[in-house]
Image (cartoon, helix red, strand yellow):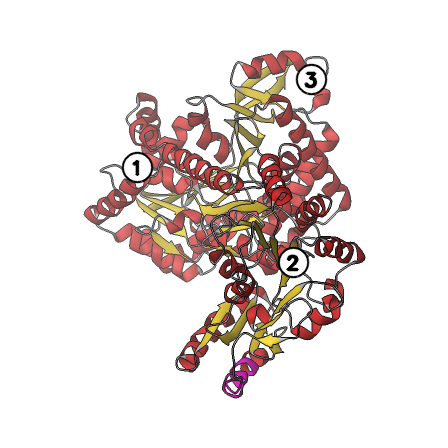
Amino acid sequence: MIIVSNRLPVSVVRRRGKLQFQPSVGGLATGLGSFYRSYQSLWIGWPGIPLEEIKGMEEDVKEKLLSEGCYPVFLSQYDIENYYHGFCNKTIWPLFHYFPQYTVYEEKMWKAYKKVNEIFRDIVLEVMERDDFIWIHDYHLMLLPRLIREEVPDATIGFFLHIPFPSFDEFCLLPWREEIINGILGADLIGFHTYDYVQHFLDAVRRLLGHEHALGQLIADNRVIRVDVFPMGIDYKSFSRIVKAPEVRKEAEKIKKRIGDRKIILSIDRLDYTKGIPLRLEAFDLFLEKNPKYREKVTLILVAVPSRTRVEPYVLLKKQIDELVGRINGKYGTLNWVPIWYLYRFLPFHVLVALYSVADVALLTPLRDGMNLIAKEFVATKVDRKGVLIISEMAGASKELGEAIVVNPNNRNEVVKALERALEMTIDEQIERNRVMQERLKRYDINRWVNDFIDRLSHVKKLQKELYARKLTAETKKSLINNYRKSRRRLILLDYDGTLVPFAERPEKAKPDNELLKLLNTLTRKMENEVVIVSGRDRATLESWFGNLNVGLIAENGVWIKERGGVWKMIEPLKNDWKREVRPILELYVDRTPGSFIEEKEFSLVWHYRKADPRLGMVRVGELKDALLHLIANLNLRILEGDKVIEIKNASVNKGRASLKWILKEKWDFILAIGDDWTDEDLFAVLPKYAYSIKVGFVPSKAKFNLSTVDDVRSLLRELANT
């Protein structure tokens, strides 16, 4: 396994002219740090030091990091400033956390982001082998899956985003939104912490690129891609056991001695505007104001780990927090009591766990947070111990920790009530609530999270291989052409849109080009061949396009047929008086769905919603189907759902039934049928076993084989025409 992230779990620092190697800080490094050494894995990332500071020592650094299972990506100071401090932290971070007011859109930073993703790609290509699993992490490397895929099309790639994926209204503010989405879609499996983030991502994919999904599975670039929820776990056993370690107990005693018999409310965060620390302090201020009885009875230990100290919003945030802490301590403090014990520093692991163990309440109220592993770590240290977790509903972890007290961080009164409830909760209730959460955290720990992701990635690759196994290979194509060459009577059934020409909404864009007309003409000149165009288009259009060719025609998905040199006939006497009842329903949904429209054929009605808002379209299509089902129950009609269309037509008419007119006409030595649409499945279903059936695109189908594109179809037909 190759793990790829912005930072390595080991950082390089320069002190007094010497290089030192130390563990990295951060949720990803902490979370995966305990796991990756137990696998046959290599971790690729930036070692945390500019290239200029280790010039001439790169090989020594690389050798040392390789001994730790790491492979460095060296970045210049310019790259770090514009890619990491720039695009990652000034563009993606604020935008994805719903702080557009802090978001900076600069072309220079975007170019640096692309360049660094390309540097990472080159390193991955340098070290990877064919069967490696590549697991790319987080918002720093959202272009990387696509960059690797372009070089190694069959690579096994997983991508996991550790921060929220925003709603489309927020995401669409990003000028480079399509590049980001396309970059992520280079992965086979895309993971998020919560179902909300999954839905936001799939919504963006649908609205920007037009790809629909079914239960989190979609097709892009003729490849199955899975998008799913994997809430990141922690190393539960380590946290539950380390509470008893001597150094933790010793530190816990020191904290208790300093606090005395007061209740401890613990707040630990990286200093970031997404964490909602000022609002939390204001809520604590209101709590003390409303509850004089708790003055001198509680202490808030506020730990703010320094972060991005040179970025202006963080500098202003630090100043705001300092002032709030000073004001609250000055307002309520006494000679013997300071309400807030403020620590602006990074804490060693044993001190952190000691704080978890002694805290009566953990107050974690971020305004937005991808997961928040601190909440899980706190609960893990409370085995058979009292302690209450108060967590923001905006944190991903709140979806798993329902037994905690969940609050809206913007509602100060709600946070105050949560503190009152937490401090008054019985010990038995505290232990029981924690026990339920602990069982959940124990089951879905960091190892389960990793294994779940890897298993799902393997499953996606297996599904892809099953579909690709039906690809018309060079060997199969050779066999097809040999059978074609030896046969005396051949039937070729061809769908039109999406098979012979790319799908186009505007009719003039879908007209057959001269190359296609020449190709069809060559095929039909051979006496052995009978060619039939099997289309959903109306007969007038097909007549104008192909009337001069010696081909059979099927129009409106089987309503009308025309044999070579013949006239148009209906497959059976049909009525269209039902349209008077159905059309008003469709018109109502056109009015309710801006961008949708009705196409009327002689014996069918089609409601198109390709140009409508995708989210509204998905809602309306469900409502419309329900309304139509009741209406057409006794009218012998059928509802066909296609690619952003709903068609209502006679239940007995389809491409398969119409094609039987030719299939049963004589004993063919060779039959070939090609189509790309859901309507072509009826055709594939009626073919004899010896026939060649080909689906354009890699999706589940009754066809025996697949081809990727319209160009592949034309290439095959060209070979047949020249045989």
Q: Residues within 10 Å of mark 2 (few under 14, many from 20)?
A: many
Report the quarter where the C terminus lies: top right
Q: Which residue is mark 1?
A: 442
304 or 368: nearer the viewer: 368
* Residue 84 seen: yes
Indicate which label's residue lies in the foreground, 1 or 2: 2
Which residues fall within the magenta stretch?
576-587
Task: Measure the C-alpha gap from mark 1 to mark 2.
Answer: 64 Å
In space, the residues marked 1 and 3 are separated at their CA atoms by 42 Å
Task: Give amino acid for label 2.
Answer: Val
Depth check, mark 3 against mark 2: the one in front is 2
Q: Position of residue 242 (x, y in %)?
A: 32, 27
Relative depth, front residue between 162 and 482 = 482
What residue lies at 57% left-to-right and 68% top-to-bottom? 557
484, above or below 254, in the image: below
Q: Is residue 580 magenta?
A: yes
Q: How many marks?
A: 3
**Percent coordinates x, y for residue 529 in the rendering:** 65, 54
Q: Is 321 inside the magenta-drawn segment?
A: no
Label located before the other in sequence (1 or 3): 3
Q: Nearer the viewer, residue 329 or 116?
A: 116
Label 3 crowd (10 A; few <14 / some 14-19 / many >=20): some
The residue sitting at the left extreme is 428
Answer whether labels 1 and 2 touch (C-beta < 8 Å): no
Residue at left offset 30%, top offset 21% = 246
Residue holding disc 3: 54
Left or right? Give the position of 716 relative to 697: right
Q: Which residue is mark 2?
A: 531
